[in-house]
Amino acid sequence: MYNDRANEVADADEFGHRISFAYQGKFLEDTLGVAFGYAKLFQPSVSTQFIGLANSREKDVDFLANDTDNLDPNRPAIEQCGECESITEGFELQHKGGAETRNGYMATIEWAPVDNFVLKADAFLSKFESKEFARGFRVKLEAPNVTIANPTVVGERFNRWNVQSYSWCEYSS
């Protein structure tokens, strides 16, 4: 298995693998049969995501006269800022990834010493391990002291903290 997006996210694995084998055998003049099997899967995963937050404010950021392209026809014009653009609350960028490892074991036995008696037993065991990571960056533009100028974000502080394995940055005022 090859993950062609692994180079987009740090710590992501490019290659996974799958292996399996099985054995079947008959013994004691074909009255006893046994089978054993094993399968392993290592499957890395990775994703990138952009999340745009809600457009909750209106502000004239392009300062074009008679710019009424953004009027909502479903609302009365008197309630709207005709020259304003919709301003988003912000956005998030995220990298997610990890790997899953699955090991499966199986065994079966069948004993038929005579034609009218058959004894069968089966067993299956599956073990699963999952490791995940996520990193993100959030920009919030809804604080009252954040202004948008030419259209550049101007604010008061930049915060960073880590919560478990999730690194998070937030811009706010």
Image (cartoon, rainbow, N blue to C red):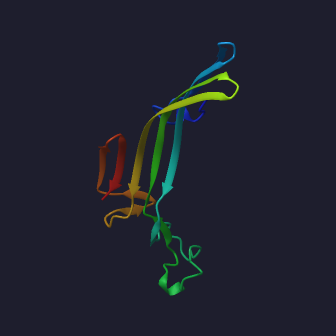
Question: Percent x, y for residue 30?
Answer: 69, 16
Between 89 and 144, the residue placed more toward the observer is 89
Q: Quadrant of residue 18?
A: top right
Image position of 172 with respect to 37: above or below: below
How many discs mark residues in the rendered view? 0
Q: Quadrant of the N terminus?
A: top right
Image quadrant for the C terminus?
bottom left
Please name whichever residue, 91 or 166, is drawn nearer the observer in this view of the structure: 166
Report the residue at 68% width, 29% height from top: 116
Is residue 5 in view?
Answer: yes
Q: Say if 115 sits above or below 9 in the image.
A: above
Nearer to the camera, 30 or 34: 30
Name which quarter of the figure residue 90 lies in: bottom left
| Residue 132, x across and y down, in percent | 44, 38
Task: Measuring from the top left, give residue 79's x and y in whole percent.
Answer: 48, 84
Q: Residue at x 53, y 42 (%)?
A: 47
Image coordinates for residue 55, horizontal then vertical, percent: 48, 67
Image side of residue 102 versus residue 148, left or right = right
Q: Residue, x 60% and y 29% (percent of image)?
A: 120
Residue at screen point 56% across, 30% down = 122
**Is 30 left or right of 38, judged from the image as shown?**
right
Whether residue 171 sits left or right of residue 111 in the image: it is left
Residue positioned most to the top:
28
Residue 4's place in the image compared with 66, above or below, is above
Residue 22 visible in rendering: no
Instruction: Classify residue 79 as left or right of residue 147.
Output: right
Q: Is 98 rendered above or below residue 36? A: below
